[in-house]
Amino acid sequence: MFKLISIDPGKCKCGLVLAEISEKKVYKAIILKSELLADYVRNLNTVEDISKIVIGNGTNSGKIIEKLDFLKQEIITYEEKNTTYRAKARYFELFPISGLKFLIPREVFILNKNLDAISALIILEDYCKMKFTLSPNIDFKTWLK
């Protein structure tokens, strides 16, 4: 299995997804404090066979690459322009609105959502040039402190 980590870097928080390429599935999607990222990736690397890390080239990416330098995997920076904006639309593809919720403006459903993990997914999808689906038993956390 060929697994990748994708990271949407930020000054205070980062979005991270773990995906398997051949299955086109996301197995983890989280948002965590930037200061916890290196330890989380280190621990994840002990239980998963990660072959590459794709990091958005935006805010704080240089510092995060330095923190992940201990890894032996290839670290690739990739364009992340407009991923946060695009994450709003992708959110509704992943979590469609159904029933009477159609009567409520869509923006209400994402007002307080952290979209960094979905931004990391978009970075990965752009890099791989394919769409991913969520694993049925995905551990999708909106925040890890």
Image (tube, rainbow, N blue to C red):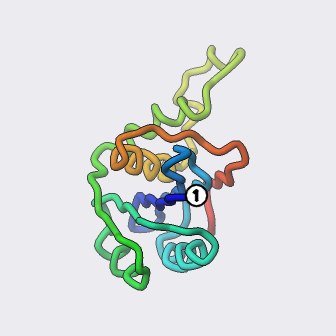
In the image, what residue occupies the spot 53% across and 36% down? Answer: 91
Dot 1: element: strand
Q: Observer-nearest residue: 138 or 14?
A: 138
Q: In the picture provided, is 126 more to the left or to the right than 28?
A: left
Looking at the image, is 141 positioned above or below residue 132? below
Looking at the image, is 29 positioned above or below residue 83? below
Q: Residues within 10 Å of mark 1 (few under 14, many from 20)?
A: many
Q: Which residue is mark 1?
A: 30
Q: In the picture provided, is 117 more to the left or to the right than 79?
A: right
In the image, what residue occupies the spot 34% across and 69% down? Answer: 75
Q: Amino acid at mark 1?
A: Ile
Residue 45 image position (x, y, % from top left): 55, 74
Q: In the picture provided, is 4 more to the left or to the right than 27?
A: left
Residue at the far bottom: name it: 70
Looking at the image, is 121 positioned above or below residue 7? above
Residue 22 image position (x, y, % from top left): 51, 48
